[in-house]
Amino acid sequence: MVDAAHDQVDFVPPAEVEEMELYHPKSFLTKYVFSQDAKVIAIQYSFTAIAIGLVALVLSWMMRLQLGFPETFSFIEAEDYYQFITMHGMIMVIYLLTALFLGGFGNYLIPLMVGARDMVFPYVNMLSYWIYLAAVLILLASFFVPGGPTGAGWTLYPPQAILPGTPGAEGGIILMLVSLAFFIVGFTMGGLNYVVTVLQARTRGMTLMRMPLTIWGIFMATVLALLAFPALFVGAVMMTLDSLLGTSFFMPAIVHMGEQLSYGGGSPVLFQHLFWFFGHPEVYIVALPAFGIVSDLISVHARRHIFGYRLMVWAIVIIGGLSFIVWAHHMYVSGMNPWFGFFFATTTLIIAIPTAIKVYNWVLTLWRGNIQLTIPMLFALAFIVTFVNGGITGLFLGNVVVDVPLSDTMFVVAHFHMVMGVAPIMVVFGAIYHWYPKMTGRMMNVAMGQIHFWITFLGAYAIFLPLHYLGFLGVPRRYYEMTDTTFIPASAQDLNAFVTVIALVVGAAQLLFLFNIGWSLVNGKKSGPNPWRATTLEWQTAQTPPGHGNFGKELPVVHRWAYAFGLPDATEDYVPQNLPPDQLNSDYDNSKLSPDTPQAAE
Amino acid sequence: MYVAVILILVAVGTVVFHFMSPWWWTPIASNWGFIDNTIIITFWITGVVFVAVILFTAYCVLRYRYQEGRRAEYEPENKKLEWWLTGLTGVGVAGMLIPGLFVWNQFVNVPAEAAEIEVVGQQWNWSFRYPGKDGVMGTSNVRLINDDNPFGLNPDDPNGRDDVLVDGDDLHLPLGAPVKVLLRSIDVLHDFYVPQFRAKMDMVPGLVTYFWLTPTRPGTFDILCFELCGIGHHAMRGSVVVEAKEDFEGWLGEQETFAQAMRRTGTDKALALRAQQ
């Protein structure tokens, strides 16, 4: 495997791009607003995603207040509650996580890490952001139309999504569907960029099997999204037609509130197939970038190569492929033909094998490493804990017969929050602490980072672990209030109150994180170009933050994989990907070039 | 040091919480104990993996903490170790999947002797239908639903005349007899679930879905709607009474049949008139 670490081929001349070929922006407007620089677009995506994510955070507080202290907050009616859960779910999954991982991290990291000047279609990339922004604004507009936003649940199941009796059936649902269509159009523009850039714009020597796993994760997630979102798109179009024109794609003969409706012949189950054909890959659209990024965080901060790189790449590819043949495990009790259960339970449980391999390899990367407990490493450790926890509860729900009692209980809520909420968000935080120095030239404050980390990790775990047990008890999800039953003890309400209090605290801790982002911009220690002494190309740029065009006159040439940590024959414990093989013993530690090198360790 | 300790506490705390939790299955009242067993198997296999991974992580954090000047070991791959881990994971997955599919096979194959009953859902209440003395459900159609015929039964179908209709009362089931629960919705999605029975299924307008069970414990249990169905979802509740066969039959005899309902509403006269014409 040592041959994978070094470039044995003859010297290749570096690729040059003439200054002429880069269309540098000439005005403030084209540099910072209608920018075609992927790094600026990345920051625009990230800020928009985090801003709308804060709306979803507040919505989660409101619903927790209702669950924890029912009848205390009289302003939260059943109608409001169902609107809160719907908007919270949709915002978090699509408008925050998908946009942040692909539009945010994808834009920032793909060109830098593969050694490209920019995305291959910068203008289309710019349009991608503005259409995304329009989608967000349309979504927000639904809060202000008569009837408010839709309260159909984030799954938007017809018939109820478009019938009175569900909040937002008048206008909210239409705005939701239109917003989703905009999002998908915008995403497709960005997604084509990410895929083509990875396939066509890698610098010399950057073979696919030398790419950092961050890029593999984002790349594969983008491929999934390009193939999966069209299913949601057609579902949204058909439901819009059912609602506005009275077509019957998803609407069978219905008697609603004592009145015969003119629908007939459509199938509500068809919508569920379309939704989950998108919806299950969507889980991996969020998870794969997290898998990739956390691999790099673990490797850099444990000062050790990722363990089993090739298997990690193949696991990403296999998970991506399998994610298209497991969707109906969301529909075991939907009324579809029950014989499907055999097939989908089998495919679903098989997907656990490549996923488990990834977990083993993360942990085996730590093994015999030299672990620096930096803030990004802490978040990576928290990811391992929460992802393993959330992953194994997936083995419950994926096993069709076990899903029968657990589906639509709080167990499901706890499972998917742990596995695709908490775990990827741990990676988001770790990644922001990790790449912030490259984006700004300054380190984030470690003390604030420590407080933020411990409250967020332990708090989120304390919120979602016990909720699984309410699910065993049989407490349903999506209940505005749980009136007396014969089987739920009073202590369940105490647990709900506890969870609400913790949720408020964890939410408040995020304000400290946001404050840290702003505070460190001015007061953070200067980071130098490569504070973590990392190997990948984004840390080897001439300027920090990198200017338009990313690299200097010459693009870097890659000589080895991204994980040359602890090479026995090198001076330092890391070897940048672009360091020529004959300079392994020279003083290449560029962080030493900076007079004010920060403490990498806590 | 403290990071490793906290990781260990998280792993141990999770296990302790699991065994000490006051929130657990509500005692079962059906034949689906097999489902509970599959879950116990799943708990053991996944629990061991969870604890092992977290404890190993904690060990690494403790043992391989950063030391200035030390180098991580350079061993990019270890095929033998990777194959072993893959193989063991495969065995663990099979250990959960095979019993699961075995039980699912029972779940989808309804015993021939199961008696049919029907549950009809609408925003936001339940109603129930029994096949009557002939043991056969009459046909129904959403288009036939009106105030006098809330179930949408076909008045021309002789099989439906003796069907017993229960609207606004509890569902009753005989103890120890397998039942196939046919599920119908007339408006939006609903889901019929009794936590003590462990079995649930969505009710889909335009389809008749089903599951089966054998009630094994007498008592009165809650019926809850388990598929979001609008602003009254959380209030869509009902009760099921499981009782000895004699009590069940006594209760059933007091309920109104479709023929009686038609006489009460005068629908039968209109029908007879139509037949004459």
Image (cartoon, coloured by chain):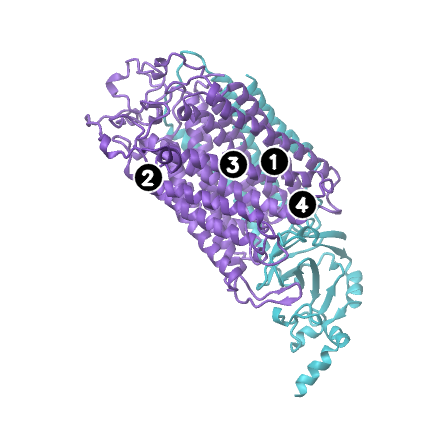
Chain colours: A purple, B cyan
Q: CA distance from mark 3 to mark 1?
A: 24 Å
Amino acid type assigned to the residue bearing label 4 in the image: Gly
- The tag earlier along the polypeptide, 2 or 3, is 3
Q: Position of residue A378 (x, y in %)?
A: 51, 24
Q: Position of residue B27 (x, y in %)?
A: 71, 45
Q: Secondary structure at mark 3?
A: helix
Q: Are marks 4 and 1 on the same chain?
A: yes
Marks 3, 1: nearer the viewer: 3
Q: Position of residue B149 (x, y in %)?
A: 69, 71
Amino acid type assigned to the residue bearing label 3 in the image: Ala
Q: Mark 3, residues whose alpha carbon is within 10 Å: few (<14), some, or many (≥20)?
A: some
- Name the chain letter of the residue that bears numbered label 2: A
Q: Secondary structure at mark 2?
A: helix
Amino acid type assigned to the residue bearing label 2 in the image: Pro
Amino acid type assigned to the residue bearing label 1 in the image: Phe
Q: Which residue is mark 1?
A: A464
Q: Are marks 3 and 1 on the same chain?
A: yes
Residue A448 left/right relative to A70: left
Please tell me the numbered disc located at residue A122.
2
Q: Are marks 1 and 2 on the same chain?
A: yes
